[in-house]
Image (tube, rainbow, N blue to C red):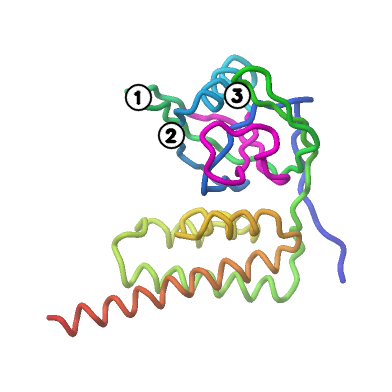
Amino acid sequence: MSELATTPLPPLPARLPVIPLRGTVVFPHTLQPLAVNRPVSVDSVNRALNGDRMVLLVQQAGEIDDPGPDAIRDIGTVGVIRQMAKGPAAIQIVVEGLVRVRITDVARAGNLLDAAAEVRPDDETREIEVEAYIQRLRELSDKALSFTSGLPQDLKALVAGIDQPLRLCYVIASMLDMKGEDKQQLLEEARLVNKLRAVAKALSREVTLLELKGKIESEAQ
């Protein structure tokens, strides 16, 4: 097997404020809007905005409203807050995922949940099977757009314009209606080809559902 290829990664602060996520995952190389209203998350946002704007976005185990260190998963994403707006019920933020990390220590003081983390570089090996999955994902994206107006209409241009397989994988995954646990497994997966296979399978299922929906609607008419 060829060695894993990686890209340069940014240095991380010693500790990062944590935003625990319920049922969702923020991937590296993607932009994700989030509504933040829990005290533990609000404090993390405020701390980040008063500093380097970096946060640790990590899925929590279970649906507990006030998660502690024991509820935090081991693998997450370091991101940076790009936009913030205060709403009547929640703070609306847009975060850009930067890099995948493994959490080495989590602590809580009052509402503030913070953690130490180490970078876990993603595999970016360009093997033949990776190239095949890139073509498959582009074909499936075109097919999905032909069946529905629910997907972003600039998806085709976006997918065509992404040359990095890892980013393509994460961007498409962020748009799919995958279960939170499946997205977490995708983030934790070590090999790029396995990530691409999982996303291609999920997108293929979405296309099949769209085809069946269209057939049912045609028969009803």
Instruction: Say few, some or many: other residues with alpha carbon within 10 Å of mark 2 (under 14 / 14 to 19 / 20 or more).
Output: some
Return the x and y of residue 84 as percentages of the image width and height.
Answer: 45, 25
- Give me the disc on residue 157: none
The answer to whether marks 2 and 1 mark residues whose Cβ atoms lie closer than 8 Å is yes
Three-letter amino acid code at the position of disc 2: Ala
Q: Which residue is mark 1?
A: 87
Q: Compared with residue 2, is residue 74 higher up or lower down, i.e. above or below?
A: above
The answer to whether marks 3 and 2 mark residues whose Cβ atoms lie closer than 8 Å is no
The quarter of the picture where the N terminus appears is bottom right
**Outermost residue to the top:** 50
Q: Which residue is mark 2?
A: 35
Instruction: Look at the numbered disc 3 and give the secondary structure of its residue.
Output: loop
Which of these two is toward me, 124 or 57? 57
First in sequence, mark 2 or 1: give its number.
2
Between label 3 and label 2, give the one nearer the viewer: 2
Which of these two is toward me, 31 or 17? 17
Q: Which residue is mark 3?
A: 53
| Gap in angstroms between the C-alphas marked 2 and 1 | 9 Å
